[in-house]
Image (cartoon, rainbow, N blue to C red):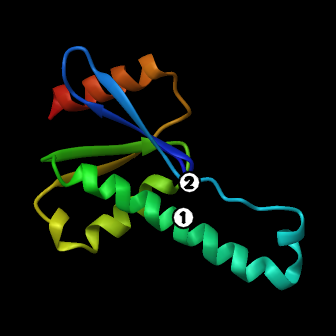
Amino acid sequence: MDHASANLMECTDPIETKIITAAASTRTDDETLAKRESQTHNKEQQLLGDFYKKLGEVIKNYEAVILFGPTNAKTELYNKLQARIHFENIKIEVKDADKMTENQQHAFVRNYFSKS
C-alpha cells in the first residue's frame, strides 16, 4: 500500500486482488501559492483520512491483517487503527516491503499467512 492505493488480498486459492484508491487531490498551480498552502494541506489530510477510513471498514471484517509496502502509509494506517476499539481483537502487523508486482505481492501474502 501507499498513499494513493491499497491492494486488498484475501488469502484464498487463488488470491484475488481488490484495489482501493484514495481520492485524488485536485491541486492546481494556483493552489501551490503560500496563501493556499494550508488549505491544500488540510484538504489532502482529509482525503487521506477518508482513504484510511475506507480501508478500516474492510479490515474490521478480518482476524489477521498484514500491512506492507514501500511508504509510511502502512504505519500511518496502523496507528489510526490501533487508536480505535473496533480493531483491538484483530492481529495487525506492519512489514516494510519494496515495490512489488502483483504476483510478488501474492507470494508475500501466502508466505506470511503460511507461517501464522
> Relative to 74, is 43 above or below?
below
Q: Position of residue 108 (x, y in %)?
A: 35, 26
Which quadrant of the view contains residue 37? bottom right
Residue at which label 1 appears:
47
Q: Quadrant of the C terminus?
A: top left
Label 1 packing within 10 angstroms: few (<14), some (14-19), many (20+) = some
Residue at which label 2 appears:
23
User: Looking at the image, is mark 2 or mark 1 earlier in the sequence?
Assistant: 2
Label 2 packing within 10 angstroms: few (<14), some (14-19), many (20+) = some
Task: Tell me the residue at 89%/69% (across/down).
Answer: 30
Task: Tell me the residue at 21%/27% (across/down).
Answer: 11
Whether residue 36 sits left or right of residue 83 in the image: it is right
> Relative to 37, is 1 above or below?
above
Label 1 near label 2: C-beta < 8 Å? Answer: yes
- Circle 1 sits in a helix, a strand or a loop, which is it? helix
Task: Tell me the residue at 36%/62% (across/down).
Answer: 53
Callout 2 amino acid: Ala
Whether residue 108 sits left or right of residue 60 in the image: it is right
Callout 1 amino acid: Leu
